Image (tube, helix red, strand yellow):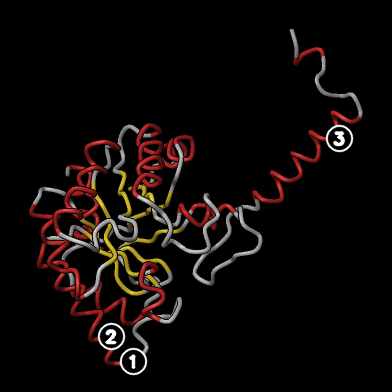
């Protein structure tokens, strides 16, 4: 909890919070050396690493493998594990057990739960079991069929009022922070200003207390998917492809392995 308190203290001081996703040990190590505030092992793992069409197929077993890997790559910063679809939807008992597995087996510091009016009791039960929870409102990918797709939230007064209500309720039941995804920036600003706990934005404008991106989007690893909210800081897809082609050509031209590469 010490690391999570540091994140909350940043809001109190007016300092921005920096988060990224990671799914493996070496990426986690890089993020820690870059001194970001926390790592989220998102269920986006299923899409960007496992090739699923959306986040719904990701299992607890798959998420545990990813969270364990990330935890092995870091020493100081907190790791937050995303609760996958059906890991908390069926009963409080299942939710507590699955959330507990992330802390017990993969050494996560907290879990993230996609949050709606229908699961306040589940989230509260997890928190009462001494497991820190980060809420998540706005575009909640596990509810894409209910939402009608990845549609920006908060465009109407009714939607905005609903989001504000959910955010305030999550603070009241004990969430230590909330992800705001795909929310109209002015609504995200109002939510952020109304809460004592930090908001972490992704596609929710500049007024949140912090920001998070999927690491693959930041690094330009998927040339076919460039979401509006993301910014590419590198073009690793092209760099990796070029490296592989150079490797192939060196083999075909008998340049690899050279004398320095064998015994």
Which percent across, then down, holds residue 40?
Answer: 36, 51
- CA distance for labels 3 and 1: 56 Å
Q: Report the residue at 89% width, 31% height from top.
A: 252
| Marking on residue 156 | 1
- Which residue is labeled 2 in the image? 160
Q: Secondary structure at mark 2?
A: helix
Q: Which sits earlier in the primary sequence, circle 3 or circle 1?
A: 1
Q: Quadrant of residue 89?
A: bottom left
Which percent across, then down, holds residue 171?
Answer: 14, 66
Q: Secondary structure at mark 1?
A: loop
Q: Quadrant of residue 135?
A: bottom left
Q: Nearer the viewer, residue 205 or 216?
A: 216
Q: Report the residue at 37% width, 32% height from top.
A: 72
Q: Which quadrant, please, contains the N terminus?
A: top left
- CA distance for labels 2 and 3: 56 Å
**Quick check: 173 above or below 36?**
below
- Which residue is labeled 3 in the image? 249
- Pick out the residue farthest to the bottom: 157
Q: Report the residue at 41% width, 76% height from top.
A: 145
**Quick check: 219 above or below 178?**
above
Q: Which sits earlier in the primary sequence, circle 2 or circle 3?
A: 2
């Amino acid at each position: 909890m010490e690391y999570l308190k540091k994140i909350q203290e940043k809001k109190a001081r007016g300092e921005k919070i920096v988060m990224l996703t990671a799914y493996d040990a070496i990426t986690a190590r890089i993020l820690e050396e870059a001194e970001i505030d926390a790592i989220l092992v998102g269920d986006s793992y299923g899409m960007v690493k496992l090739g699923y069409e959306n986040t719904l197929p990701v299992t607890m077993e798959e998420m545990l493998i990813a969270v364990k890997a990330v935890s092995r790559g870091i020493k100081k910063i907190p790791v937050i594990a995303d609760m996958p679809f059906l890991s908390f939807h069926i009963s409080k008992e299942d939710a507590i057990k699955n959330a507990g597995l992330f802390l017990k087996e993969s050494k996560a510091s907290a879990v993230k739960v996609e949050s709606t009016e229908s699961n306040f009791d589940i989230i509260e039960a997890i928190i009462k079991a001494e497991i820190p929870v980060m809420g998540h409102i706005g575009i909640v990918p596990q509810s894409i069929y209910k939402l009608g797709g990845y549609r920006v939230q908060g465009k109407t007064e009714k939607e905005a009022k609903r989001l504000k209500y959910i955010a305030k309720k999550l603070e009241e039941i004990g969430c230590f922070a909330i992800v705001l995804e795909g929310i109209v920036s002015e609504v995200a600003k109002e939510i952020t200003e109304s809460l004592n706990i930090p908001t972490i934005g992704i596609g929710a404008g500049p007024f949140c207390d912090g920001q998070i991106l999927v690491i693959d989007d930041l690094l330009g690893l998927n040339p076919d998917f460039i979401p509006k909210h993301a910014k590419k800081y590198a073009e690793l897809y092209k760099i990796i492809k070029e490296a592989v082609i150079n490797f192939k050509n060196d083999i075909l031209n008998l340049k690899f392995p050279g004398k320095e590469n064998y015994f």
